[in-house]
Image (spheres, helix red, strand yellow):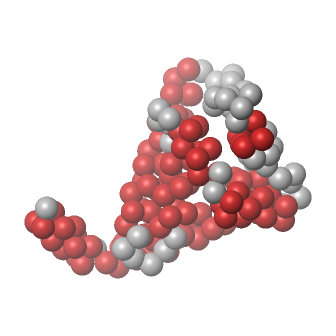
């Protein structure tokens, strides 16, 4: 375990400038895109018992597959970058959260609902939505027993 940590620290030391620039770039991209992305969430997204299905696109299945692959790769890159940002300057937790939201994986909706139930996060998202002129999200607790 100690060898693994030493290897990670050695990689970070060897690529500190690139990691710092990448970290700053992802920080500014996530900071600029967060309000837009949050404003696009449907008001009732967290009130369903399962994943809220978006409308199916009319694209060819190969294009849909390629877009899904790109989305998952982008989410993976953001997840890894967020983990690196926990050790370097940048918004590591925010980047990890966006990476998790972008990707598709089993249990994603449950994890999103668990995160959104945190009052600090829920209030912060609704504040961002209010600044963009959008209605606040409905909390999952109102519909938990249905």
Q: In the displayed orientation, state which residue is furthest to the front.
A: 145
At 63% from the left and 68% from the top, the residue drawn is 31
Residue 38 locus on image (x, y percent) = 71, 53
Residue 11 pos. (x, y %): 22, 70
Q: Is residue 34 visible?
A: no
**138 or 5, nearer to the observer:** 138
> Is 3 placed left or right of 27 in the picture?
left
**Residue sitting at the far left:** 3
Q: In the displayed structure, would residue 140 be above or below residue 99?
A: above
Task: Tell me what residue is drawn at x 71 percent, y 64 percent.
Answer: 124
Residue at image coords 89%, 58%: 133
Residue 95 shown left or right of residue 113 in the figure? left
In the rendered image, residue 113, in percent from the top left (x then y), is placed at 62, 44
**Can the viewer see residue 51?**
yes
Q: Quadrant of the C terminus?
A: top right
Q: Looking at the picture, does residue 78 appear above or below residue 138? A: below
Q: State the image quarter where residue 83 is shown.
A: bottom left
Q: Quadrant of residue 121?
A: bottom right
Vertical placement of residue 37 versus 131, above or below: above
Relative depth, front residue between 34 and 97: 97
Q: Quadrant of the rendered structure where residue 128 is?
A: bottom right
State the image coordinates of residue 120 (x, y, percent, origin top left). 67, 64
State the residue in front, 69 or 142.
142
Q: Residue at x 56, y 20 (%)?
A: 61
């Amino acid at each position: 375990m100690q060898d693994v940590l030493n290897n990670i620290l050695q990689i970070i030391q060897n690529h500190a400038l690139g990691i710092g620039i990448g970290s700053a770039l992802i920080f500014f991209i996530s900071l600029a895109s967060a309000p837009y992305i949050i404003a696009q969430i449907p008001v009732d997204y967290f009130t369903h018992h399962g994943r809220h299905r978006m409308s199916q696109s009319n694209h060819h299945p190969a294009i849909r597959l390629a877009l899904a692959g790109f989305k998952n790769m982008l989410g993976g890159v953001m997840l890894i970058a967020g983990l690196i940002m926990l050790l370097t300057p940048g918004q590591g937790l925010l980047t990890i959260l966006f990476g998790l939201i972008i990707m598709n994986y089993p249990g994603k909706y449950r994890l999103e609902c668990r995160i959104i139930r945190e009052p600090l996060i829920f209030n912060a998202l609704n504040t961002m939505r209010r600044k963009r002129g959008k209605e606040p999200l409905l909390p999952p607790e109102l519909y938990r027993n249905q």
